[in-house]
Amino acid sequence: MSTSFFEQLMAEHAEWEEDRRIDAARARADHALAVADAHALDATLAMQRLEQRLAAQARQLKTLRAVIGVLTTMLKDSGAVDGDMLDIRLEAAIANSEEEVERVITVACQRCGAQVDRRRTVVTASGTVCDRCDAGR
Ligand SMILES: [Zn+2]
């Protein structure tokens, strides 16, 4: 079975069209990879900044612990304060601040806008929503 000139021409055109589609698909894939690389780089830089911030805060905490340790020891040693009473009051103050931290962590529901306890929220594709909005979706 021989192919006519027209059939051969159309076959070449189809081949050329297929090559063009492959090139276009390859260009889109390259672009998508470049975008993904850029996002990965952004995420890496953000992680590095967070790690640096965490390290700086860890240093500050260490310094504060040292300062507080020296101050409490000096106060106790000088007899200016009752050591046991100081420990009791410090423990109570720490417990209060921990309760406050637990209370303060509220977030705005992305759907109804209410300020809700973050433990009563769900992270969805459209953002953090309260349990009530999540149940009613
Ligand atoms: Zn809500």
Image (cartoon, rainbow, N blue to C red):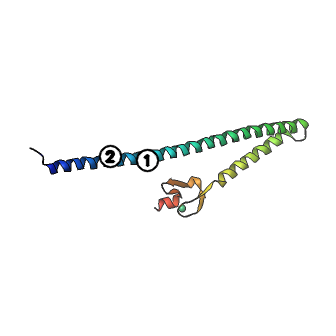
Q: Nearer the viewer, residue 21 or 116?
A: 21
Quarter of the image with the N terminus is top left
Q: Where residue 92 sits in the image (x, y, percent)?
A: 76, 46
| Residue at position x 40%, y 46% in the image | 29
Could you say which is closer to the camera, residue 15 or residue 67? Answer: 15
| Residue visible at 52% across and 61% down in the picture | 132
Q: For the residue marked with disc 2, what is the amino acid?
A: Ile
Label 1 CA crowd tier, 10 Å (few <14, some 14–19, many 20+) = few
Q: Are marks 2 and 1 in contact (CB under 8 Å)?
A: no
Left or right, 96 with reference to 32: right
Upstream in the sequence, badge 2 or badge 1? 2
Q: Residues within 10 Å of mark 2 (few under 14, many from 20)?
A: few
Q: Is label 2 in a helix, a strand or a loop?
A: helix
Could you tell me the amino acid type at mark 1? Ala
Q: Is residue 12 above or below residue 62?
A: below
Q: Regarding mark 1 in the picture, which secondary structure is present there?
A: helix
Query: In which quarter of the view is residue 73 placed?
Result: top right
Of all residues, the one furthest to the left in this rendering is 1
Which x, y percent locates residue 7?
16, 50
The residue that appears at 73% across and 40% down in the rendered structure is 60
| Residue farthest toward the bottom in the current orientation of the protein | 112
| Residue 21, horizontal then vertical, whole percent | 31, 49
Q: How many marks?
A: 2
Give whichever of 77, 129 is nearer the camera: 129
Q: Which residue is mark 1?
A: 32
- Figure check: 97 above or below 87: below
